[in-house]
Image: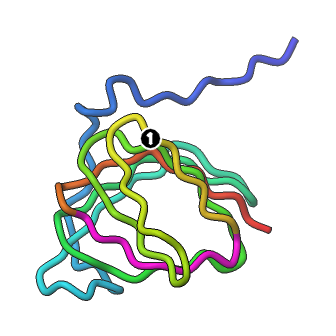
Amino acid sequence: MTIIRTYAAHNTADVSLPPHAAKPTATTEGMTESGQSVWANDRIDTGLWECNAGSFTATREGYSEICTILSGRVTLEVEGLENEVFGPGDIMVMPSGWKGIWHVTEPLRKHYTTIQD
């Protein structure tokens, strides 16, 4: 019998992440981020990520991302579409090829899963 380990992050509000660093795609001065993978293989990565308030550009090229907002609030701006606001408990899917601007209005923490094309 093969035993396969379970990977878990219990009570994600209490999970410590590495120190914040500057957000490379920030359009707001002083914006920082931190993230921690919980589990990954050659196509899938899942973990926790957070950032402070501000705006940044984002693209999903070569991978799709599914995330659940754990705390905070963000408005996603995508050219040609209505802005969408997401908060705790909301799920977002950004398929490969997605481009937009994140406007983080409250410090944000999310659980993410990325899937390589």
Q: Horizontal placement of 34 versus 64: left or right?
A: left
Quadrant housing the N terminus: top right
| Numbered range of the magenta stretch | 96-104
Question: Which residue is painted at 53% across and 51% down in the image?
Answer: 92
Residue 24 position (above or below residue 95): below
Count of labels in the image: 1
Question: Which residue is painted at 20% across and 72% down in the image?
Answer: 32
Q: Please name whichever residue, 32 or 87, is drawn nearer the observer in this view of the structure.
A: 87
Q: Please name whichever residue, 91 or 33, is drawn nearer the observer in this view of the structure.
A: 91
Rendering coords of residue 53 (x, y %):
17, 66
Residue 108 position (above or below residue 38): below
Rendering coords of residue 4 (x, y %):
73, 23
Q: Label 1 crowding class (10 Å Cα cut-off): few <14, some 14-19, many 20+? A: some
Residue 89 position (above or below residue 76): above
**Dominant secondary structure of the residues highlighted in magenta in the image:** strand
Write down the residue under mark 1. Answer: 90
Residue 101 is covered by the magenta coloring: yes
Q: Please name whichever residue, 78 or 107, is drawn nearer the observer in this view of the structure.
A: 78
Q: Residue furthest right?
A: 1
Q: Which amino acid type corresponds to the residue marked 1 in the rendered image? A: Asp
Quadrant housing the C terminus: bottom right
Asked which quadrant contains residue 65, the reply is: bottom right
Rendering coords of residue 107 (x, y %):
18, 55
Color encoding of the figure:
rainbow
Question: Which residue is painted at 59% across and 51% down in the image?
Answer: 66
Q: Horizontal placement of 94 versus 41: left or right?
A: left
Rendering coords of residue 98 (x, y %):
62, 75
